[in-house]
Image (cartoon, rainbow, N blue to C red):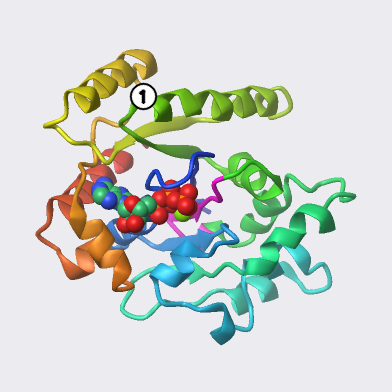
Amino acid sequence: MLEGKILSVANQKGGVGKTTTALSLGAALAKRGRRVLVLDLDPHASASVHLKVYQEQVTHSIMDVFGDRETEPSEIWRKVRMTPHGQAFDFVPSHTHMTDLETDLKMRQDKGMILKHMLAEVRHEYDYVMIDCPPHMGVLLINALVAADLVIIPIQTDFLAVHGLKLLFETFRTLNRILDQPIAYRVLATMFDARAGACRRVLNLLRKKMETKIFETVINMDTKFREASAQGAIISDLYPNSRGAHQYNLLANELESLW
Ligand SMILES: Nc1ncnc2c1ncn2[C@@H]1O[C@H](COP(=O)(O)OP(=O)(O)OP(=O)(O)O)[C@@H](O)[C@H]1O
Ligand SMILES: [Mg+2]
């Protein structure tokens, strides 16, 4: 049975384009016929709100995947998955109660492996599982890193953002000591402004430092992202001819050429 690739979109730094990447890339892959599941793992539920999926309206969420130990995994996945309006991918919404998991799971031995084990139940139904991660270190982010076949690290093209990568790489090093295989990752330069010299310098620095571990595709600054998210839409739905939509299509091409 062919297993779908698990892609975790992660960076402890906030506002770097994680949610935008998880949704825009997920939608780009789904539009070309790939079977895609997107998980919102951020208690802020930005991806859910972005898709107009509000927690008051759903009875199940990613919370069940972590917290329900009574129900069969297949039944849990049946209950938590939904298709957001107008989208071609499956989705599991988040819930603000996800913040409680940090304490709830404290004593659980396998607390970092829960998502990996749960995804083993459904990943064969998909070509890609995209995980939108929270912007802080904790049990949820660890679960996403451990489960991932590839961690996509969006990074804003500014000097402070590059510095922020250190923290994430330290976590990778710690996890790599106990994992069978080291965490595979690719950095994605986002919010790039070609007119700004500082942006160009950071991109050059990133390419030099990361060597092959950075996507060729760069996501430029595009105001259409904010406009789309404000309207609860993905950029390619509202502005299919925008540069942002085009660049996430290029990213989907590049990603598919990795395997
Ligand atoms: N390439 C871009 N150009 C311009 N604006 C962008 C771009 N990518 C994302 N944005 C906007 O920047 C804001 C932050 O993006 P996003 O929510 O994807 O970041 P995030 O890393 O998920 O944030 P958080 O850490 O809070 O979860 C959003 O308003 C989004 O619409
Ligand atoms: Mg986010």
Q: Residue 61: x, y in percent? A: 62, 72
Q: Is residue 129 magenta?
A: yes
In the rendered structure, the answer to whether residue 5 lies left or right of residue 204 reads: right
Q: As displayed, is residue 187 above or below residue 53?
A: above
Question: Would residue 218 be found to the left or right of residue 56 on screen?
Answer: left
Of the pair 143 and 106, the residue shown nearer to us: 106
- Foreground: 225 or 243? 225
Residue 154, placed above or below residue 132: above
Work out which quarter of the rendered image holds the C terminus and state it.
Answer: top left
Q: Magenta stretch: residue 122 in it? A: no
Q: Secondary structure at mark 1?
A: helix
Residue stretch in magenta: 124-135
Q: Is residue 244 left or right of residue 63?
A: left
* Residue in the image at 12% along x and 56% along y: 242
Q: Within 8 Å of ligand 1, the CB of disc 1?
A: no
- What amino acid is labelled 1 in the image? Phe
- Residue 121 coordinates in the image, percent (x, y): 64, 60
Q: Quadrant of residue 103?
A: bottom right
Q: Residue at 50% across / 42% down in the picture?
A: 10
103 lies left or right of 137 = right
Residue closest to the eye, 24 or 256: 24
Answer yes or no: is residue 126 visible.
Answer: yes
Where is residue 186 drawn, in percent x and y? 41, 31
Instruction: List the single residue furthest toward the top.
Output: 208
Give the residue number, with chain letter if any, for mark 1: 159
Q: Is residue 22 visible?
A: no
From what the image shows, is residue 176 above or below residue 52?
above
Residue 4 in the image, given as x and y percentages of width and height: 48, 52
